[in-house]
Image (cartoon, helix red, strand yellow):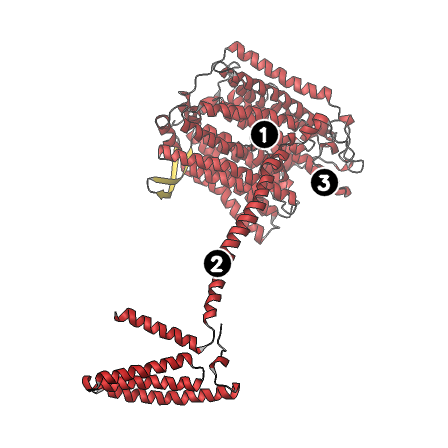
Amino acid sequence: MFLGESLAVSAIIFGIGVAGVLFRRNAIVIFMCVELMLNAVNLSFIALAQQLGREGQVIVFFVMAVAAAEAAVGLAIMISIYRHKESVNLNDIRLLRG
Amino acid sequence: MPGVGWLWLVVMLPFAGFLANGALSFARPDAKRLVSAIGVGSVVLAFLLAFGIVQGVAGHSEAPHVMTYWQWMPIGQLTLDLAFQLDPLSSVMLLVVTGIGALIHVFSVAYMNDDPSYARYFAYLNLFVFFMLVLVLGANFPVMFVGWEGVGLCSYLLIGFWFSDRANADAGKKAFIMNRIGDFGFLIAMFMIYRETGSLSFVEVFAAAPTAFVVGGGVITLITLMLFLGCTGKSAQIPLYTWLPDAMAGPTPVSALIHAATMVTAGVYLIVRANVLFAMAPVSSFVVAAIGAVTALFAATIALKQWDIKKVLAYSTISQLGYMILGVGVGAYAAGVFHLVTHAFFKALLFLGSGSVIHAMHHAYQHTGRHEDSQDMRNMGGLRKAMPWTAALMWIATLAIAGIPGFSGFFSKDEILAMTFARGGEASAFFVLWAIGSVAALLTAFYMTRMMLYTFHGPNRTGTDEEPHLHEAPWVMTGPLIVLAIGSVFAGLLNLPAVLPGSGWLHHWLEPVTAASAQFTAEAHIEQATEWVLLGFATIVAITGMVGAWMLLKPEAVKPAAEAPAETGFGKVIFNKWYVDELYDRVVVRPLMWLSDLVLWKVIDKGVVDGAGVNGIATVTRLVGWIGSRIQNGRVGTYVLFFVVGVWFVLRVVTV
C-alpha cells in the first residue's frame, strides 16, 4: 500500500538532494542534501521491503550507520576547513584545480 | 706433400697470427721479437704450405677442388656454404698473395721497427692476408664478398694507421667510402646473378651461364657492368680511382702489399673469375677495356708531374692496373693475370725500394732534427752513392715496368697490347685502345726514368748536414728486394710469347678457367710477322721513353722542395691531378654536404623528425593535458555534475 506514493516522495526528495548538491555552495547545506538523498533511498527501500522481504529494512539500518559515520568524519573535516579558511563556501575551496 | 685437405690451414695461419698479435698489442706491445716471429712466421708458413698444396694438385685434374667446410646460410632454395675453391686461377693468386706477402712482412720488420704500434701493425697485416686469401679462395660470390669487404677494412685500418694525423684518417675514410660505391655494384650484381641462375657458387653459376643468359642481352650486360663497378672501386679505375693516391698515407710496406701487389688486383681477379659472364657481354667487355686503357693513359700523365715518390708509384699502379683491366676487357684473361703477377713483383719492389729511400731520408732528417718532407723527390737526388743496392734493385724494377725486352714487364704488357691489337680486326675501336695503351707505355717509361733520375742521380739536395747520415737500409730490408728483383726479371718466363721459343705456360695453366669463355670470343689471331713488329714497336716505345726522360730532364736544375717555384701552365694542371679531386668535391661532395645540411638536417631531421615527430607529439600531449586540466577546476559542483551526468548515462545505456 502507498507504494507508488512512497516511491514518488522518495524520488522528489532525492531530486531535491541532487539539486542542492549541484547548486548550493555552502558545504553544510550540501552535506545536508547528501543526507536527504540517503534518506530518500532509505524511504524507497522501506517501501519496497513491504513487498520483497525484510532485507531492504536491514540495508536501511546499514545506510543509517554509514551515514552517521560519514556525518562524524564530514563535519570534522568541515570544522578544520573552517578553522583554516574561515569559510565553508565551496567557491573558496579550490585547492585541487588543474 | 700436403694435400688439398690442408687448404683451410693456409687461410687460418694468418688469422691465428692476427689473433696472437692482436692480443700482444694489448698485453705486451714491447715484445717485438715475438710479434715479428708470429707475424712473419705465419705468412711464410702459409706460403710454404700453399706452395706444397699447389704442387700436389698441379696438372692432376681439370675440375676445381671445392672444399666445403660448413653450411653458412641455408635460406629457402639458396644454400650458401663456407667453401674454398682451388683451381689454376686461385692457386696463382694464392701464391702471389702469400709469397709477396711474406716478403713484405719480412721487410716490415725493419721498416716498422721504431714504431710504437708495432704489434698492431702486424696484427692488421696478418688480418689482411687472411681476408685476401678468403677473397681469392672463396668458392662462391658471398664468401668472396666477405674477403672483398675484409681487405677493404684492413686497407682502411692500415691507411689510417697513423690516425693521430687528421689527413691520414681522412685518407682511410676516403678509401673506404669510394670502395663502398663499388661494393654497391658488386652486391647488385650478386642479387641479379642469383635471380637469373638460382645459385651463387662459382661452379654452378658459370656452368648455368651459357643457358641462363642471352649473349649480349640486357641482363648479362647489366650484371657485368655492376660487377665492373665493384672492380673500379677495388682496382682504382676511372671514375673511382682517387682514393689510391691518398692511400699512400699508410706505411710504405702497406702500399706495396695492399695498394700495389694484391688487394687492388682483386678487381682483375674478379673479372677473370667471371670471364664467362664478361665474354657473354661484349658491350660490357668493351667498356671494361676502354676504361682500362683510358685509366692507363690518364694516370700516367698525372705521374709525370708528381714530386712525392710514393705518389708517382701510386699513379703508376693505377696506370698498370689499367693495363690489366684492358687485358681482361679484350678477352685476354691469361694476359691480364700474367701482368698481375709480373706487376706484383716489380711494383712491390719499387714500393719497398721507395720505402728504403724514405726510411733513409727520415733517419737523416731525424738525426739533424730538421722537418722536411722525406718523400719529396726534390729533397733527394744522388742517393745512389749512399744506397747502391736500393738504387740498382729499383733500376731493375724500372726496366721491368718500362717494358725493356728481357724483363718481365715487357712480356706481360706486350701481350696485353698485342691482344688488343689483334681484336682490331673485329672493330677498329680496338686499334684506338691499342694506341692509347702504347702512348701510356711511352709515358710509363718516361715517368719511371724521371723518378729514378731525381731520386738517385744528379746532385744531392737533402741538405749538407743530412747528407752524411744517408745510409743503405739493413739486410732485412734489402733481402726481400733482391728476391723481388729476381722475380721482376724472370717472371716473364712464365708466359713467353710463341714467337720467342716460349710455351705460354701460364696461358695453358689457366686454360681450365678461361676455357668456358672461349666459345664466346673469337680466336684473336696475329700473324707471326705482325707480332714481331709489335714486339719491336713496344721496344722502341720503351727505349724512347727512357732515353727521352734521360735527355730532357735535368736533375741538376731541380731545387729542394722548400725553394722550388710553383708549377705553371699545363704542368700545373697535371701536378694538380687534372683537378679531378676538386671536380668531385664540387660535383659530388659539396652538393651532398649542402643537401645533408640544408635539406636532410635542417628540413627533414630538425623540421620533420624533431619538429613534427618528437616535439609535435609532445605539443599535442601538452594540449590534450591542458584541456583535461581545465576540467579539473577544483569546484566540487562541477565534479558532481559530471558524476550525475555519468550515472545518468550509464543507467541509460545499461538499463535500456
Chain at numbered mark 2:
B
Q: Quadrant of the N terminus of chain B?
A: top left
Disc 2: which residue: B617
Between residues B173 and A79, which one lies in front from this camera angle?
A79
Chain at numbered mark 1:
B
Measure the C-alpha gap from mark 2 to mark 1: 54 Å
Secondary structure state at the residue bearing disc 1? helix
Chain at numbered mark 3:
B
Measure the C-alpha gap from mark 2 to mark 3: 64 Å
Q: Which of disc 1 and disc 3 is earlier in sequence?
A: 1
Q: Residue at x 57, y 39 (%)?
A: B175
Disc 1: which residue: B318
Question: Residue B44 bears which disc, if any?
Answer: none
Measure the C-alpha gap from mark 3 to mark 1: 30 Å
Q: Which of disc 3 and disc 2 is earlier in sequence?
A: 3
Please say if B586 is above or below B442. Answer: below
Disc 3: which residue: B363
